[in-house]
Amino acid sequence: MRHLLRSVLTCFVFGLASLLTVGDVLAEVRVTRPVDYEVIQRDNASRGRVLVEVAVPRGTRVVQVRLRKLAGATRGRDLDWKELTAPELKNGVVRGSITADAGGWYQLDVRALDGRFIVGKASVAHVGIGDVFVTAGQHNAANYAAKRQVAKSKNVVYFDGSRFSPARDPMPGVMGDMGNYWIGLGDLITQKTGLPVCFVGCAIEYTTIAQWLPTAKARGVAQYPNLIQKTRWFNPNGVRAVLWVHGPWDALAGTPAQKYHDQLIQVVRSARQDVGYPVDWFVAQESFHVRAGERVEKQVAEGQQMVWKGGEAYEGPNLDDLLGRQWRHNGAHFNAAGQAEMAKRWFEAISAKYGKSIDAPKRARRVVPPKKPRGRLPQL
């Protein structure tokens, strides 16, 4: 009897010790990418490569990830536990990736294993694979519209350079404290695609095109470096397009058409080189300024049109015919009707370029890659 009691007690102690050991190391796992509400740009096959960075406990040999669709997600497919592709270990942080179908929101779960047992777990509550747009220019790309809005869809988010958040005005990272029309555009896009969509604000008021050149500064803010830094934050090929709304201050300054064209081309080409891939640009026609004349406004508008016709950017919406109290609340900035119309016009411009791919891109013919070695890591 005494021998039996000792055996039971020994098993209990070892079992308890095992549980305590696992519990102690679970807190050591911390996911630094993706972050909550991060949107990864889908590719032409409607899939996305999710970069994963996770701090793991000593002894970790394998890191596995899975994706689970959250309630309410209309697109996407669960991904069961899978080892990271091409994992790298440095200073206790594992970096790798997984590829999954466009969709969201997903919950991303991570677990670290020592080869036999799970030694730590962590999760990111919201991860999406959809579309990312950078918005840039001046006041009518920023927060000066009359109506503050909250996205109707939970799929629309803003990114301020370090943090994602459900979209509600004012947009972070740009000037002004009122509303804009990007939320309306996001609602139209996600209504069509069923996917998360992210807007990254880079608009700065009171700027001419010369002040957006790579070496220029205005009002203490380096416009071009800000644009590049926010775009680079995302994966390679991680932004679908830059949406450019700019021009009134060049009309006020009397910028000739050729000069506006040449300097905007320099911005576009430099940006593509500095981010490392040929990100699309859409250029809206905007030249109206309440203190400029029609002659100089036409020069700026012509410069913008030259950029479209030369094939360096795609044609965005026309803002110059949305004038007066019907569309603007103070002569310069949009009222609620103008915001709704601009969202509609941007959606039409983007759809004209991307066609069915703004809805549901066809899956590319799948090529089976050669087998890769399992993603084992050297022990820390």
Image (cartoon, helix red, strand yellow):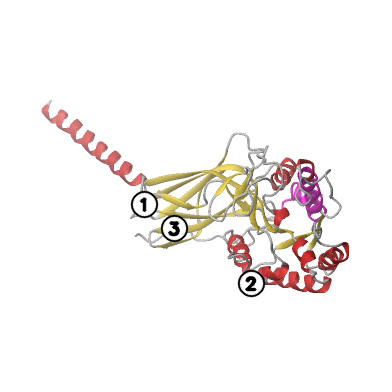
Q: Earlier in the sequence, mark 2 or mark 3?
A: 3
Task: In the rendered view, tell whether residue 332 sits above or below residue 187.
Answer: below
Q: Is residue 348 magenta?
A: yes
Please name the residue that numbered disc 2 is placed on: 216
Circle on res. 106? none
Asked whether, in this view, residue 30 is left or right of residue 236, the answer is left
Mark toward the viewer: 3 or 1: 3
Mark toward the viewer: 2 or 3: 2
Tell which residue pokes out farthest to the top in this image. Answer: 1
Q: Is residue 255 magenta?
A: no
Residue 282 x/y as whole percent: 76, 59
CB under 8 Å between discs 3 and 1:
no
Predominant SS along the magenta part: helix
Q: Is 369 or 97 nearer to us in this picture?
A: 97
Q: Earlier in the sequence, mark 1 or mark 2?
A: 1
Q: Secondary structure at mark 2?
A: loop
Q: Is 128 or 148 nearer to us in this picture?
A: 148
Residue 36 x/y as whole percent: 53, 46
Please name the residue that numbered disc 1 is placed on: 114
Please name the residue that numbered disc 3 is placed on: 94
Specify the segment rendered in magenta. Answer: 339-363
